[in-house]
Image (cartoon, rainbow, N blue to C red):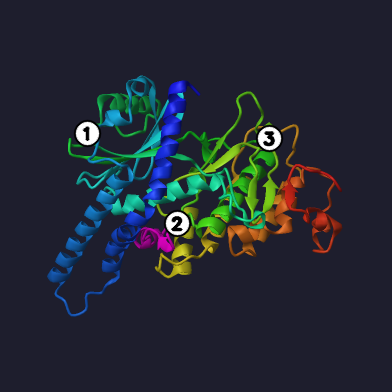
Amino acid sequence: MTSTNADMHSCREGEMEEWWEHENQFSCGLNRAVSCSSSDEESDGFGEQNGERNCRESSSRLRSSETAYHLLVKITHQQRPLSFRHVFTQERIENVVKMGVGTYSKVFTFRNENTVVKLIPIEGGLNFQGRQQMRASDVLPEVIAMRAVSQLDTCPALVPLSDRSNTHNFVHLQRVSVLQGSLPSYLLSACKQLQSVEKSAKIETNAFPKTQKWVALECDYCGDVISDKWPSCLQARLSIFCQTALALAVAERRLRFEHRDLHCGNVLMSCVEGMRECENEAPSSTLDGVVYRPCGGPLASVIDFTFSRLDHNQAPLFSDMSKVCEGARTSEHPIDIIYSQMQEELGNHWGQYRPRTNRLWLNLIALWLWKASKGPPCNIHPDTDAKLKWSIILHLLMNSQSAADCAQSRIFCIVPLLMIPSIPSRWFQSSGSNYLDLFSTTEVDFNSHEGL
């Protein structure tokens, strides 16, 4: 890290601390802004004329959006929206590269910096990716969620050791900014460069007006989407699953967190250059004072909290997914099926805490990691007994009520160790086997083969 980047990083750490100091000042307004429009949509308007109800709901949504927008600006300590130059310095302009697009965003990175900028257009009348732009009240929960999970890599010093939970498997938010303007020419050029590679991509035009508002989320670069580069090594795939499950488990403990959209596009992986996937050292996580050390594999990072639910200042923070789930009911795509299952689980009361939704997404990720096409097999960790290992994981998930419930099972600790082909499946037929008692200490090391 250069001295300039180090100074910027230090500055951003200071900003994060200041943000938390001001939480109580806007917390009530935040929950009111986010929940206002949802409560209006749930009201049946009995006894009102349709025109009066629509007028009232439109007015309420407008007030909610305005409140949320001002809260967004307040979080960033800005007096007003800034120009794109606030985020895209000259050095960044010379090195900017478009990574891709999300459902509601454009994502850029830089050749000389391990930072990603997610640009979200808000409050505009121009459709983006064929959809209506997000409102400030839609983006605000994601910003708060990203800030919250960014703090999960540490634990307050006063927390007893037996209650500590922390993880390094969430993307780290560096800074949030509110910008205004049409897309600058250098970003359009970056978009066109990506489109020249992706022939089917839609041609980018600068249709956004000068009054267009944007939210810019600056995050650590976390590598590739796992579905774009499936690991060829069985151990590496198991490591990614374990890291993801532990991340959700810690977030459940600390934040009463549900991701609610954890498909493979929202799990990234990064490897040390020149090393095999399975030779990377995966970070440990701590859950209720127990340290879990996953087997060797790429660093897995959970991203995208557009639909996430968590407790914020003792109140639920969430997004109403009713319309998303209703639109998915006729689809047989695995992601849409889970949307429908979540809707059935929550009954459209999206503020409820139901960590079983995390288990539903983990089940899908496990199936994908197992079944997805891969490259040539790893000559260090062959796929021997792969069906047995993933079957054990899926069985465990089916009998778990949350990610934490899954992670704290002794069987969860065992599966990554099954890299030795000679381990017989009969060892799992009795919960009283000596093998299941290997992890009675306060530290679980998935790399250890002691006792086998």
Q: Would residue 385 be found to the left or right of residue 228 on screen?
A: right
Residue 261, percent across and down? 46, 53
The Cα atoms of the two marked residues, 3 and 1, are separated by 44 Å
The secondary element bearing badge 1 is classed as loop
In the foreground, 429 or 246 = 246
- Disc 2: which residue: 336
- The residue at the point 30 percent across, 62 percent down is 32
x and y percentages locating residue 121 in the rendered image: 28, 42
Kind of residue at disc 2: Asp
Asked if residue 341 lies left or right of residue 102, the reply is: right
Of the image marks 3 and 1, the number of the one nearer the N terminus: 1
Residue indicated by mark 3: 278
Q: Specify start and end residues of the magenta stretch as a single range.
A: 313-331
Residue at point 41%, 54% (across, down): 307
Q: Earlier in the sequence, mark 2 or mark 1?
A: 1
Label 2 packing within 10 angstroms: few (<14), some (14-19), many (20+): some
Disc count in the image?
3
The residue under label 1 is: 182
Q: Residues within 10 Å of mark 1 (few under 14, many from 20)?
A: some
